[in-house]
Image: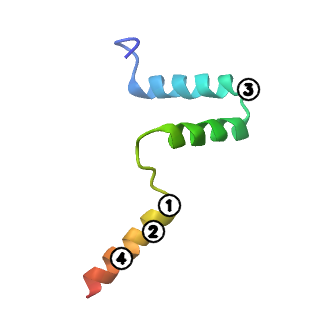
Amino acid sequence: MENENQSILEEVRSWKEDVAREHDFDIKKIIYSAIQRQKSSNHRIISLEEQDAGSKEKRALASG
């Protein structure tokens, strides 16, 4: 953490402010940038549709 006394919440708020400022507080630019970061990461991105489908499958299996 940058400052030992800075709470995690303050750190997250500061990061969000920095990201917004970098994109001129334009929500479309912020979202586009986030999508590009997700595409270039090596992490699996789970969509709400995938989560919903997984929940339905679990309920179907549980009800047998």
Mark 1 falls on what kind of element? Answer: helix
Mark 1 Cα within 10 Å, few/some/many (few <14, many 20+)?
A: few
Q: Please name the residue shown 46% across and 38% down the image.
A: 41
Q: Earlier in the sequence, mark 1 or mark 4?
A: 1
Which residue has dot 4 on it?
57
The residue under label 1 is: 48
Who's the residue at 36% across and 13% down the image? 5
Q: Secondary structure at mark 4?
A: helix
Q: Earlier in the sequence, mark 4 or mark 2?
A: 2
Q: Which residue is mark 3?
A: 24
> Which amino acid, by three-letter code, is at mark 3?
Asp
Give the Cα separation between the discs numbered 4 and 2. 9 Å
Residue that numbered label 2 is attached to = 52
Classify residue 11 as left or right of residue 34: left
Residue type marked 2: Asp
Question: Pointer 1 and pointer 4: residues touching (CB < 8 Å)?
Answer: no
Task: Assess disc 3: are there few (<14), some (14-19) or many (≥20) residues with their C-alpha within 10 Å of its C-alpha.
Answer: few
Q: CA distance from mark 3 to mark 2?
A: 34 Å
